[in-house]
Image: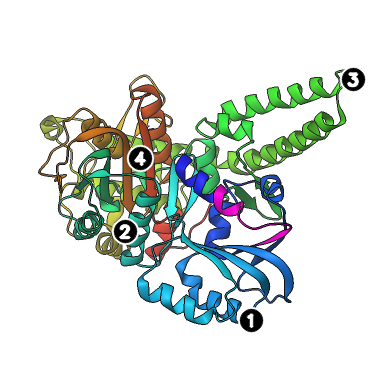
């Protein structure tokens, strides 16, 4: 990410005098989480515009950072000559034909610079990027472009049995000319783990995405907006923690701000910063209050899910007695995955005297299960159950399948049959890149970041996907309206 940030900052520094910054909907979302408004002002920008907006001509320089989807609008822009001159950066590779078309439209020669920036995605968090693209081909192109921007030369592995993973791997390999590798990229399909997106989240960032509206750099609910910029120390510390920890830490943070304000001789700038911090902490308090009710509402269903995964005999009828329709469906999906797609390997289960009764919850959701299978499971045969840490509560000790896969990869135990190597090129690979088509969850993101922090501190992990996936999205896709 450091090399990409340097390229973006170099682009922002082009042009002289006061300037306009021209973005589109993709690049606006890409830049806002990583470049603060204060930093943009330091580059002498006084106008911030989107290319779709109607603007009057003005005699200033313009730095335009755009995705390829905006090329037709760029052609119109330079023909109208809205700004005195343009420094244009496109966040994807340009073909010779596209460059020639731009040159034809620039009849007044006002484009002073045209470069590729190789940043076709949105940084959702420090180690998590969501790619631009509306179909599989565009997403594969964005992935290849991003790898180029990151100066990555990866050894490529993919999920066997997933046609999409194979095609994506082949596309990445077709553009690779490296003789040495500096990283591993594992190209996966969401089908490799369908348990995790359905599980209830129990940490701050994951719950914010599940119960509020989570966008890069911003959490919104109702009329509230909470900016989670890089200087938000509270969010950085608490995003992977449970609500109890976050609440206690919030109390301490408020006290720290109060004590700081009472210090004699404090500079005005520090007072303003503390006021800003106090306001942000107040918004965190509101967000935590908003989502904390779900902890109580979903506790028993979450435990029932864990029992099913761990083969603990339970009475499902009792578990759903007070459950909502959405809770019942989530539990039914987990039951179906456990019973049909990832049955227990425990051969002693048959002989248990107190084994689970024959009544099946998912029998009441046949249409939803059929659509779930068709949409997500498809023909995949190797679905495995997740596991739990033994020294943690099951809510915080949940281990997604990705953790096992990446641990095996780092320890050179990952099956080359299930995860073939496209080209085994030598190299010192200290970075692991995971591309998950079909969406990545914040539960998985947290688990992998913590894994590398604890087990592989000298290595880096980067997660890339085409979207953030939540249980609500899955339930909506099988024709059930989500309810909280």
Task: Say which of marks 3 and 2 sits in front.
Answer: 3
| Residue of label 3 | 265
The part of the image, by quadrant, that contains residue 255 is top right
* Alpha carbon distance from label 2 to label 1: 61 Å
How far across and down, in percent of the image, does residue 367 sit?
30, 65
Q: Quadrant of the rendered structure where residue 265 is?
A: top right
Q: Residue at x 80, y 24 (%)?
A: 258
- Tag 3 and tag 1, C-beta contact below 8 Å: no
Q: CA distance from mark 4 to mark 3?
A: 56 Å
Residue designated by label 4: 305
- Under tag 4, what secondary structure? helix
Q: Position of residue 373 (x, y in %)?
A: 25, 60
Residue 364 numbered tag: 2
Q: CA distance from mark 3 to mark 2?
A: 68 Å
Is residue 96 shown left or right of residue 245? left
Circle 3 crowding by C-alpha within 10 Å: few under 14, some 14–19, many from 20: few
Numbered disc in front, either 2 or 1: 1
Q: Is residue 153 among what the camera can see?
A: yes
Q: Secondary structure at mark 3?
A: loop
Separation of residues labelled 1 and 4 (CA atoms): 60 Å
- Of helix, strand and loop, which one carries label 2? helix
In magenta, the rendered stretch is 9-20
Q: Quadrant of the N terminus?
A: top left
Tell me the mark number nearer the camera, choosing from 2 and 4. Answer: 4
Where does residue 423 sit, x and y in percent of width and height? 15, 46
């Amino acid at each position: 990410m450091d090399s990409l940030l340097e390229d973006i900052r170099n682009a922002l520094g082009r042009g002289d005098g006061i300037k306009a910054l021209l973005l589109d909907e993709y690049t606006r979302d890409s830049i806002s989480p990583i470049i603060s408004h204060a930093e943009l002002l330091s580059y002498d920008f006084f106008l911030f515009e989107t290319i779709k907006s109607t603007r009057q001509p003005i005699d200033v320089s313009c730095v335009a950072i755009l995705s390829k989807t905006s090329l037709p609008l760029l052609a119109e822009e330079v023909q109208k000559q809205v700004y005195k001159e343009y420094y244009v950066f496109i966040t994807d590779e340009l073909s010779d034909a596209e460059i020639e078309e731009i040159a034809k439209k620039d009849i007044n020669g006002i484009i002073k610079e045209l470069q590729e920036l190789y940043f076709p995605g949105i940084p959702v968090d420090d180690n998590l990027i969501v790619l631009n693209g509306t179909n599989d081909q565009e997403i594969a192109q964005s992935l290849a472009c991003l790898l180029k921007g990151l100066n990555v030369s990866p050894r490529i592995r993919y999920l066997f049995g997933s046609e999409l993973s194979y095609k994506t791997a082949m596309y990445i390999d077709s553009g690779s000319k490296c003789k040495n590798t500096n990283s591993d990229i594992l190209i996966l399909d969401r089908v490799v783990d369908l348990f995790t997106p359905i599980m209830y989240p129990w940490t701050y960032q994951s719950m914010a995405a599940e119960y509020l509206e989570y966008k890069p750099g911003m959490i919104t609910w109702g009329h509230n907006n909470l900016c989670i910029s890089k200087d938000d120390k509270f969010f950085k510390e608490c995003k992977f923690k449970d609500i109890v920890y976050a609440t206690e830490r919030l109390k301490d943070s408020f006290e720290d701000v109060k004590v700081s304000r009472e210090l004699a001789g404090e500079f005005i700038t520090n007072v303003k910063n503390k006021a800003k911090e106090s306001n942000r902490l107040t918004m965190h308090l509101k967000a935590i209050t908003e989502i904390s009710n779900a902890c109580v509402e979903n506790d028993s269903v979450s435990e029932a899910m864990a029992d099913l995964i761990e083969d603990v005999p339970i009475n499902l009828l009792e578990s759903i007695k007070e459950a909502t329709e959405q809770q019942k469906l989530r539990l039914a999906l987990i039951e179906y995955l456990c019973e049909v797609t990832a049955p227990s390997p425990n051969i002693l289960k048959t002989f248990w005297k107190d084994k689970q009764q024959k009544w099946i919850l998912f029998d009441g959701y046949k249409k939803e299960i059929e659509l779930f299978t068709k949409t997500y499971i498809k023909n995949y045969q190797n679905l495995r159950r997740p596991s739990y840490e033994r020294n943690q509560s099951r809510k915080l000790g949940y281990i997604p399948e990705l953790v096992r896969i990446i641990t095996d990869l780092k320890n050179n135990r990952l099956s080359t049959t299930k995860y073939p190597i496209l080209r085994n090129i030598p190299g010192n690979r200290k970075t692991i890149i995971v591309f998950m088509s079909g969406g990545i969850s914040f539960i998985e993101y947290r688990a992998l970041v913590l894994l590398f922090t604890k087990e592989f501190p000298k290595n880096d992990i980067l997660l890339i996907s085409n979207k953030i996936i939540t249980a609500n999205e899955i339930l909506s896709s099988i024709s059930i309206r989500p309810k909280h």
